[in-house]
Amino acid sequence: MLPRKRQVGGEVVVEEGEPDFANESPIKKLCTDESKGSDCKNTGNSNISSSNSSSSVKPPIMALGNGNSGDIDEDLHSRQLAVYGRETMRRLFASNILVSGMQGLGAEIAKNLVLAGVKSVTLHDEGVVELWDLSGNFFFTEDDIGKNRALACVQKLQELNNAVLISTLTTQLTKEKLSDFQAVVFTDISLDKAIEFDDYCHNHQPPISFIKTEVRGLFGSVFCDFGPEFTVLDVDGEDPHTGIVASISNDNPAMISCVDDERLEFQDGDLVLFTEVHGMTELNDGKPRKIKNARPYSFTIEQDTTNYAGYEKGGIVTQVKQPKVLKFKPLREAVKEPGDFLLIDFSKFDRPPLLHLAFQALDKFISELGRFPVAGSEDDATKFISLVTSINDGSADGRLEEIDQKILRHFAFGARAVLNPMAAMFGGIVGQEVVKACSAKFHPLFQFFYFDSVESLPTEALDPSDLKPLNSRYDAQISVFGAKLQQKLEDSKVFTVGSGALGCEFLKNLALMGVACGQEGKLTITDDDVIEKSNLSRQFLFRDWNIGQAKSTVAATAAALINSRINIEALQNRASPETENVFDDTFWENLDVVINALDNVNARLYIDQRCLYFQKPLLESGTLGAKCNTQMVIPHLTENYGASRDPPEKQAPMCTVHSFPHNIDHCLTWARSEFEGLLEKVPAEVNAYLTNPSEYTTAMKNAGDAQARNNLESVIECLDKERCETFQDCITWARLKFEDYFSNRVKQLTYTFPEDATTSSGTPFWSAPKRFPRPLVFSVDDLSHLQFVLAASILRAETFNIAIPDWIKSTQKFADAVNNVMVPEFQPKKDVKIVIDEKATNILPASIDDAAVINELVMKLEKCREQLPPAFKMNPIQFEKDDDTNYHMDVIAGFANMRARNYSIPEVDKLKAKFIAGRIIPAIATSTALATGLVCLELYKVLAGEHKIEDYRNTFANLALPLFSMAEPVPPKVIKHQDMSWTVWDRWIIKDNPTLKQLLNWLKEKGLNAYSISYGSCLLYNSMFPKHRERMDKHMVDLARDVAKAELPPYRNHFDVVVACEDDEDNDIDIPQISIYFK
């Protein structure tokens, strides 16, 4: 019988309408008969009787599986919450924004704000849609021509997020109307009107954040004024830096040394707090102290500790993030005294002051002539340059000595065009500035920002006649790049890998640019993923009714709605070695460019190798929260993506995770591992055994190691004493797991290593970073204890296909069920081995008698199987982080927080636990838009051709700071031999199905003596082996098939070999891969 709580008289009392614990599952119980009596204890709260007459009413716990916080849809915004946090999101949800000017730039800004989830967005535009606008605004179609721009955007914008109120203003805007908003953005406004509106916003109480931004051809600008005094609450969005104290000196100033497992990130001037310091407890007073002389593992503080008590042990030091007050100048003053410009490209350090003049001159040109300069008009360019010169000459301070007329000429020619890549880029930047204005999260632009990409222009001089409009949707783009490049864009063959957040932005950009929209063009997109709810906050081509559908198919359909001329094929294949029959040689050879929109390094490396092999340009990008980067991989000009890699992330030692955690990340890593072991791996192992018992046991016997023994023990435990037949069994299992993990194991650990234990060298065993743990005492009055047991019980029931009873919705009834579990007393054992070696990679102790034990376990397992019902199978649970109703994160967060409580580590809520355990990549729409805009500016260069390496740009940006760092790519390493040279991009090709002798002679003619030829891992030829000389007259393809057993599919007409060579002086020469064509 299941151990149950008894009343004094020894009778089991079951209240009417409650579960009858006495009659559940008499066959298999989790606490066996042998463990009853004096060895079992009842851990229920003694003042709760089963009659419930005097018990207090407990709060419901069934909201547990649906962990949304009510005001924020965490399923939708989880990736954004990982960047901003709840408080910032709540401020956004209360913000009303005006976006004035609904050409391409206004549409991109509005899109990013609606995805972010502000309270309302009001669109203002008095103009109507023209054919010209279709190359910049992805909401417009030919059917919208003649309609008001704002009205034409409303419906499609609303589809992105129904929680945002979207309205329009189509008449002249008055400054008084601005008081309805927390932030206003103007994308198409005269300087005089902007000054008038900004004065009103600057002096308003409270101030209204004002942003003026423009995109003119390949030039763009942003101006921000957030009021006389704007407080930034969090300047960078990073978590506060921490360190674990190892020692503190009694000195003036005091020297603090920290453990050397991680470098400190503190800087001079940082303020820090001390906690948990033993001995020198004076530092635990909650007073921030300033850091000086910051070093990788130590620092000093401005504090005299000479008379403090001596440091003993422990201590956590944590950075205190300080708010920053910014004093913005109004536009009226800032335009005359702009201050320092944000430098983004060191090759253009003199460009921002020139563009500051150029945008003022353009405003003057339009006010005088009532129109933009005409593309290709030398008269208009001359007039524009004279206006720049006049403004410069009238500048009292900051007058430029030289005016670059070539740059200004490009500015004038493209001034009317709103190019999609520029709109996407600036839409990301400005969208982020609005978020900063509304939330005080991240440092704003202060105050002017200028950017240009004149390198994107074709290298050959453009004929003015090539810039004239053709009455097409691409006329704006043609006015900048010319009709010849437009035709190249339309006829290009592009492969986009991935259709998630980056992929959606790329498809939108490519459709607006006209890429693959000609008769010869084709865009292939592939993604093997399906749409989830969490995608909708960034992947804006998807709608809620698309959830569960293939990403690539839905994205391709949406791209065709943006531009019906696009020739696009959507595939659901993962680009990998397994799909090279789909993406075969012919496919790759026909491509013009590859655009990566991937989310993992391994996939990127594979595509990089394919592009390297087929010598195709690869445009690479990635995002992480507010950060993004782009990398251009251009054949023979730049290094490839895989040439340089980030160092691998530091992994916590296995013993730290299992026995000595000192931060919540360790607890969550352990929690996920335990979740997967208990609920996925063991049930899957059970099924593997039951599917084919003889094959499984034979495999275990053949392995004969500690892992095989552990697998068998886990299966037996699951099918024997831990097998569940009723939901009460599942409760018992969960309650006993709580006792095992959070009490018994801790008692054993502290028994083996007491608090005063020392190492072999005499130092305290429990010294930093180790934290001494304390066992938990279970109580149904602790809601977190009860929540863990509930969630674990439900998932355990799932694995055994046991129905979940309705009565668990009652907290009291569930608590009573938990109280009925009898928990055996625990006695620590001597000589228990606990791994403390940080270099150990396996916690399973090996034993010389593993094989004998395995034989016994196999026999025991057979007996267990005989007791199972017919066709018994378990239901393994795969961890799914994005479903808040499935109890997965409840169990993992419970595991982690109970363990954190053992070790006095600060606990986290379920959302934070989801970010860490679910390995969620923080993501926001703004950085994605910025990255794709920058990549598409590079795409112009790639498809135009003839550009030099100095024309290309790799970029790293952090919108939080804000920081933009642009530089030309790194060239590939060059290897030289005699009069030849080559790089990683070169692949030597030998055709006509050569023999081994012909290949060796071909290399000999190049002054190279081949001594080894291999195909894959198989050696086809080595000069040291006399027998290999017999292969001289064999064709290389026959050697590959006969010796290496190569299976060359019908679509493959060549294979590759790696050849090791020496020169005539016996120096090794690293030569390119050799491709041998046999048909």
Image (cartoon, helix red, strand yellow):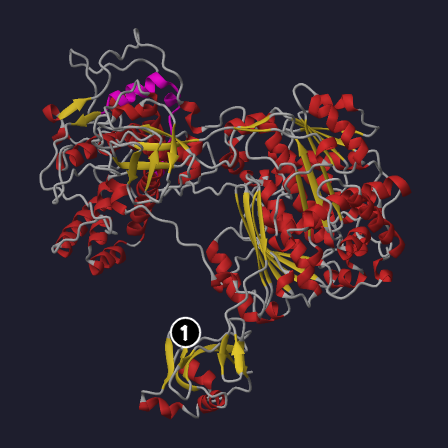
User: Does residue 640 lie above or below 448 as drawn?
Assistant: below
Left or right of 952, for residue 701:
left
Query: Residue 870, position in %: x, y?
Result: 30, 44
Q: Residue at x 79, y 35 (%)?
A: 191
Could one spot residue 447 in this view of the protein?
yes
Report the span colored magenta: 799-821
Does the magenta-highlighted stretch encompass residue 810? yes
**x then y, percent, for residue 494:** 65, 61
Q: Is residue 1067 magenta?
A: no
- Left or right, 255 with respect to 117, comes to left
Main structural element of the magenta stretch: helix, strand or loop? helix
Q: Quadrant of residue 450?
A: top right
Q: Quadrant of residue 47?
A: top left
- Report whether residue 451 is seen: no
Q: Quadrant of the N terminus?
A: top left
x and y, in percent, of residue 933 in the image? 65, 49
- Front in this rendered view, residue 219 or 556: 219
247 or 897: nearer the viewer: 247
Q: Which residue is mark 1?
A: 1016
- For the C terminus, give its image quadrant: bottom right
Furthest residue in direction top, as rendered? 54
Q: How many residues crowd mark 1 within 10 Å: few (<14), some (14–19), many (20+)?
A: few
Residue 874: where, in percent of width, then height? Answer: 34, 42
Amino acid type shown at disc 1: Gly
Closest to the observer, 799 or 771: 771
Q: Is residue 323 above or below residue 49?
A: below
- Residue 103 relative to residue 729: left or right: right
Q: Residue at x 48, y 87 (%)?
A: 1003
